[in-house]
Amino acid sequence: MKASVILAHPYKESFNHAVFNRVCGSLAECGVAVRSHDLYAEGFDPVLTGSELGREPSSDPLVRQYADEMMESDLLFFIHPNWWGQPPAMMKGYIDRIIRPPYAYDMPDDAPGGLPVTTMDGKYGIVYNTSNTAEERENNYFGDPLELIWKQCTFGFCGIEKFHRRMFRIVSDSTETERMQWLETVESDVVRIVSEAGKGRS
Amino acid sequence: MKASVILAHPYKESFNHAVFNRVCGSLAECGVAVRSHDLYAEGFDPVLTGSELGREPSSDPLVRQYADEMMESDLLFFIHPNWWGQPPAMMKGYIDRIIRPPYAYDMPDDAPGGLPVTTMDGKYGIVYNTSNTAEERENNYFGDPLELIWKQCTFGFCGIEKFHRRMFRIVSDSTETERMQWLETVESDVVRIVSEAGKGRS
């Protein structure tokens, strides 16, 4: 089994980094081959170019590497803070530039406005977010658009139905004990997801 | 009256550019002072840096210019395509880097998880989007997260209650006549918005 683990946070000591490290460690303990990328550390350029608007392969080697790894992976992990109900621009650029035709999906010329041809069916999409907003305000005022963005607009569009998302909050108010418990939760999630995904493959 | 008009689309001949040009032209005809920026053309870097996580001013002169112009403006226009239920990374980076403490809002140290101190109350937020997704699928399957993202998460967070958003669809199927009509709609919107905003100031 293979996993792609993508992180976007500018601060190396962030709790997002701790989640990223725990995901990668837990996957390795489960015997999963891990391809992990800290987009900030690798200097990824999130700006989709004009020539990437269509079906042409990107000329950026990092983009091609990330795309190859995503397509080979059974599990797709994304870890980022909740900034404005959205991922940071760095993570948004991964979506814009990596999840592109013709590999991640295709859009036939004769069906504009129609449905995409999906190529990632059967993969498992997992998202960890951190937030400094109270749950009540997130759900009732902001409407938690990250749930729609990942579940429907990204994974759903690509034919990915197996989905798990967890938002850790309120990080700025949290104690070390809470954060340790959150990382334990990450580890339990990973074990369960690997087990589920393994059954799906048999 | 002053307006800031921000565009993010990589293709210079895009319909987004036509909307941008019509917004700027209509504002000028109404006597509004226009500060317009094509983020791709200006080579804006959308990646928020570690030192921009807090309240420190950015060291990027373009960021400081955009922020000054935003704060001076009565009308804030944003024009971008619907990519994955979100703005392109280029536009997301404008939100991440320009709409920051302490100028665009502030977050007191003693209220983590609490409410921001807003500083942009009374401004008018306007968003134009283009889409290649049918309205029924956008609303019922994807859930149109761009509405939440802009109305609640961005403008609402900043205390901006006057809001107008319009999504032009399906651009890939549209005729030239339709696109001409859409641009007429933009012009009518601008005239109405300037009139409304002028009354609010008197």
Image (cartoon, coloured by chain):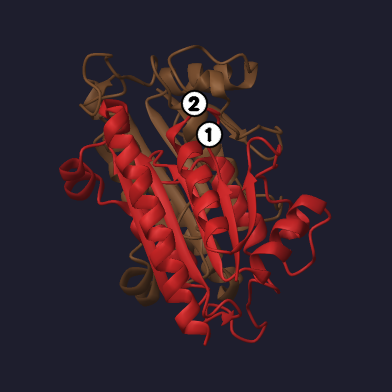
Chain colours: A brown, B red
Between B27 and A20, the one nearer to me in the picture? B27
Label 1 marks a residue whose chain is A
Which residue: 50% across, 58% down?
A: A82
Left or right: residue A82 compared with residue B188: right
Label disc, if present, on residue B171 of the rendered structure: none
Which residue: 34% across, 53% down?
A: B166
Image position of A120 with respect to B82: above or below = above
Image position of B161 with respect to A114: above or below = below
Instruction: Say which element carries label 2.
Output: helix
For the N terminus of chain A, the quadrant is top left
Label disc, if present, on residue A94 of the rendered structure: 1
Between B105 and B169, the one nearer to me in the picture? B169
Which residue: 38% across, 47% down?
A: A189
Instruction: Say which element carries label 1.
Output: helix
Left or right: residue A175 compared with residue A4: right
Dot 2 surroundings within 10 Å: few (below 14), some, or many (20 or more)?
A: many
Image coordinates for residue B68, horizontal then vertical, percent: 73, 65
Image position of B89 with respect to B161: above or below = above
Image coordinates for residue B106, horizontal then vertical, percent: 64, 77
Label 2 marks a residue whose chain is A
Which residue: 21% across, 50% down?
A: B139
Q: Which residue is mark 2?
A: A98
Left or right: residue A13 compared with residue A63: right
| Marks 2,1: beta carbons within 8 A | yes
Q: CA distance from mark 2 to mark 1?
A: 5 Å
Between A131 and B19, the one nearer to me in the picture? B19
Marks 2 and 1 on same chain: yes
Residue B172 in view of the camera? yes
Image coordinates for residue B84, horizontal then vertical, percent: 38, 39
For the C terminus of chain A, the quadrant is top left
Q: Amino acid at mark 2?
A: Ile
Residue B152 in view of the camera? no
